[in-house]
Amino acid sequence: MAQYGDKSVAPYPAPHGGYGDPHQAPPPGFNPGYNQGPPPVMYQPGPVPEYGAPPGAIAPAMAAAAPVGVPPGLEYLTQIDQILIHQKVELLEAFIGLETNNQYEIKNSLGQKIYNAKEKNDCCTRNCCGSLRSFDMKIKDTMDREVIRIIRPFRCVSCWFPCCLQEMEVQAPPGTTIGYVKQDWHPCLPKFSIQGPNKETLLKLDGPCFACNCCGDVDFELKGKDSDQPVGRISKQWSGLLKEVFTDTDNFGIQFPLDMDVKLKAVLMGACFLIDFMFFEKVGEANQRSSVFS
């Protein structure tokens, strides 16, 4: 995929001396592309560089009309089959133990930031309810437009309370529900249903018995509703000993089929955040949860 400012892609050939002869055939390799070829690729817009900015500054690329049924701001998700989610280090939280709103950077496979996510709730909820806390999470694109909203109500997580397990609602655009992530009861394993806007189950997400990343990754396998064949995964990636011990910053990777419905891709992002809070969030001196027993 050609990127903006890529010098390896040759520009249109410039004629020498004026506009050239209009009756002359174009040089070999030059294709004007009238009514030919695939539709133009849609790029995630970036911040507009100021006048006189250094070469290589990011500028918003012109995009084709959004495909039918794709919520505004999610067009870029139609082009990718994996997402990286990196939690930002909160210095105040690291030094004094006061829980702050979690913030995340969402990137493509090249490490380029495509979205920002920030938890929104009050200080009392964060520090009294711990990792079970309710919140709204706003996901914004690089133009600071809110494109996804994730709503998490207060729920239990233990297998001993099957009537009030975890649930998360995903909206895109904000105010329009596109799906849910619901924890399924199981005595040993963390299991989730990826649901549509009418709470119909579309995919299943299964985790290991002990979600503990001791010097390794933790994988949650994404499977079809009626199949055990994996179609993707959400992976908690090992961040290094110091970060894992002294902070609660986490790195995740999400893999899914390229042709998956873009709304489902957005719901999987919500599932990733739910998994982070359920199993990998540390609050004060409390230990991370590693199973559905606690």
Image: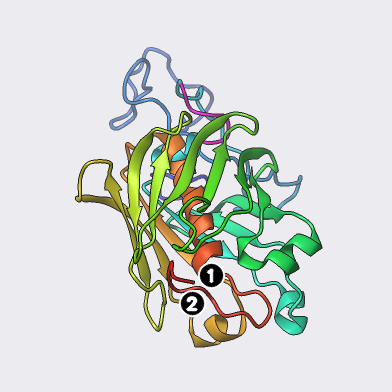
Dot 1 and dot 2 residues touching (CB under 8 Å): yes
- Of labels 1 and 2, earlier in sequence is 2
Q: Residue furthest right?
A: 123
* Residue 34 falls left or right of residue 250: left
What amino acid does circle 2 point to?
Ser
Residue at the image position 59 percent from the left and 28 percent from the top = 176
User: What residue would you read off at disc 2?
Assistant: 239
Number of numbered discs: 2
Which residues are the magenta region?
69-74
The color scheme shown is rainbow
| Residue 124 image offset from top left, x and y in percent | 80, 63
| Residue 177 image offset from top left, x and y in percent | 56, 31
> Residue 250's mark?
1
Q: Is residue 221 above or below residue 204?
A: below
Instruction: State whether residue 13 appears in this view.
Output: no
| Residue 134 image offset from top left, x and y in percent | 66, 54
Magenta span contains residue 210: no
User: How many angstroms separate mark 1 from mark 2 (CA)?
Assistant: 7 Å
Residue at the image position 63 percent from the left and 53 percent from the top = 154
Of 45 and 36, the residue lying toward us = 45
Residue at the image position 47 percent from the left and 32 percent from the top = 14
| Residue 203 image offset from top left, x and y in percent | 33, 42
Question: On the rendered image, what quadrant is the N terminus found in?
Answer: top left
The kind of secondary structure element at disc 2 is loop
